[in-house]
Image: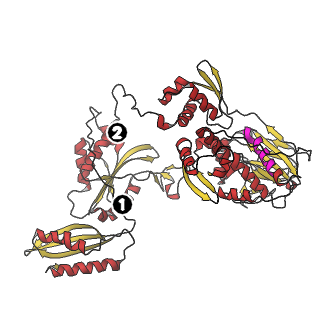
Amino acid sequence: MKISYKRLQSYFEEKLPEPAKLAELLTFSFSEVEGMEKVGEDTVFDIKVLPDRACYALSHRGVAYEVAAITGFAKKEIDRPQPEIKKVRPLLVRVEAPDLCPRYMARLVWNVTQKEFPWVKEHLEAVGQRSINPVVDGANLVMFDMGQPLHAFDADKVKGAITVRRARKGEKLTALDNREVVLDESVLVIADDEAPLALAGIKGGKKAEVTATTKNLILEAASFDASYIRKTSERLGIKTDASKRFENRFSPELAGKGIDDFTAYLFEMDKNLSAGEMVDERHSYILQNVGMSVTAEYVSRKLGLPVSEAAMLDIFKRLEIAVEKKGKEFILTPPVFRADLSTPEDVVEEIGRIVGYDKIPAELPPKQLGETSVPKSFYYEWKIREFLVGAGFSEVMTTSFSEQGSVAILKPLAADKSFARPDLRGSFAEALKMNSLNAPLFGTDETRIFEIGHVFSGNGEYAALALGFVGPKKKTTTLAEVVKMLGEKLGVTFSGETRNGVFECNLDSVFTKLPELQKLDVTIPSAKAAKFQTFSPYPFIVRDISMWISDTDEARGELIMSIFPTLSEGLLQHVILFDQYKKDGKNSLAFRLVFQSFEKTLTDGEVNSIMEKIYAAIKGKGWEVR
């Protein structure tokens, strides 16, 4: 949510802290300020408003409320001049789906001469909204200011009454972005006597679109069921600033304030307009300001920090929470826009963040009484890891999704992640391949990896183990031998399938054969000091070189420590000796050289030039390149 510092300041007589300081206060007490941008003479904050506070904080007024609570500054209420209410013409509103629309308010505004305000366009652009026309800009201005989504219809294009109803099968609506939406009975629409005018709470339609020539308006401010808006906007693939606010339980009590602010904006644009009476179709809904009670002792115990009654009363005042004292209890009534405050724990959190989380002392929780049981599967998974890491394997964790399977994902992240994985082999084999291709970067000619993870079949979920390694043909052990040694270590046979260099088995079936845990003989390895080294994002190039040299260790050391590095122009990352043998008093060595730059992608020509220098240096020593 983009918030204007200048707009926030308009809510206070006192000078707000400088933008950088205010951003720090908001981050540590309310929501993270992810960025600040200088826009003309203004500063715009990019605030990450999380869903728990979206019911009120997706607006300048909501953030101003937070600034007042954090700083203790008095927030002023802005009352804008309203036009005199006149009888314009009858406006009939019907709500046929009160379960989805608990409140619908509308007003006729007649003979409006549209006038552009440069500051409105400048403000909207600063907070990421493009200017459309003066009327629509006014609706957006109010929404970003106080949070209530608003809409205006061209009254001359509306035929008959305004009806909030479910769409009829086969009906269509052309949205304001010219997208045609095919409707069914699950979609709530705002309609006139002829056809739908808008997708309720989501997006307006072209039929009664307000243009630069529109003079007569029907203003609407409504409230819609949050779950319905979220599901429908998701299903239709239409997400808007309005739907984002409605799906976060924006209070029905604020619809009247929203339509009044919209009317005041139009009145400022044209003092000669005529405004009709408000039509308010209000149905039963649960008020958000549910009373609850807390005590100072309860709050202090939950926070682990003593909080006095006087401090709590000050915080309640800042948060506009009405208080009634009964003995030691505070009976609380949060403001209507705080739908997120519904339990005593919510109140404790509010007090904690205003007091400051940094004031809460660090204290270890009490020790668990009695013995702690360790799940059998956890213990044996740990023993398997111990053995495999000791055998030179590294553990990998691959994606739990796959392109095919028997358990489908309702909302897949991508086409190749449409199912829960039916086995480990698919993603594991790809990991084995990629790790082996990059093995030279790690200074090794062998890749050994394993994975323990859950897989999902039509018969249920179970734990599985996958093993694989890639390396020279002259291996000290085979995959089958590793599996056999692992079984001997645990005293059980691992029955599985080896295919394309990957062994996989059902671990749950293995665990059933193992004895129950007698003692927790798990060894936690000591921590090793390590220093992170930046890796290059550019690809590497490998060159192999074989040669006959004199049969001395000094000659081998000279190659590795002197000739290769000094002639590689700082591009040699690894030297691997992967083969050697003796014949006729000479020593044959084969090296793998790995070249990589931290600044660019190397070309074959650059590496070939380095290799030519190395060949020449070797020949200069009297050795022979094979």
Is 153 left or right of 532, judged from the image as shown?
Answer: right
Q: Residue furthest top?
A: 327
Instruction: Determine the CA span between mark 2 and mark 1.
Output: 37 Å
The magenta segment is 252-265
Q: Main secondary structure of the magenta part?
A: helix
Which of disc 1 and disc 2 is earlier in sequence? 2
Q: Going 58% across and 57% down the picture, which residue do you hit? A: 37
Q: Nearer the viewer, residue 248 or 346?
A: 346
Badge 2 marks a residue whose secondary structure is helix
Residue 364, quarter of picture: top left
Q: Going 31% across and 64% down the picture, which residue do you hit? A: 441
Residue 377 badge:
2
- Amino acid at dot 1: Thr
- Amino acid at dot 2: Ser
Residue at mark 1: 534
**Residue 191 belongs to magenta span:** no
Instruction: State the image coordinates of residue 590 (x, y, percent, origin top left).
Output: 20, 71
Residue 510 badge:
none
Q: Nearer the viewer, residue 108 or 604?
A: 108
Instruction: State the image coordinates of residue 193 (x, y, percent, origin top left).
Output: 85, 50
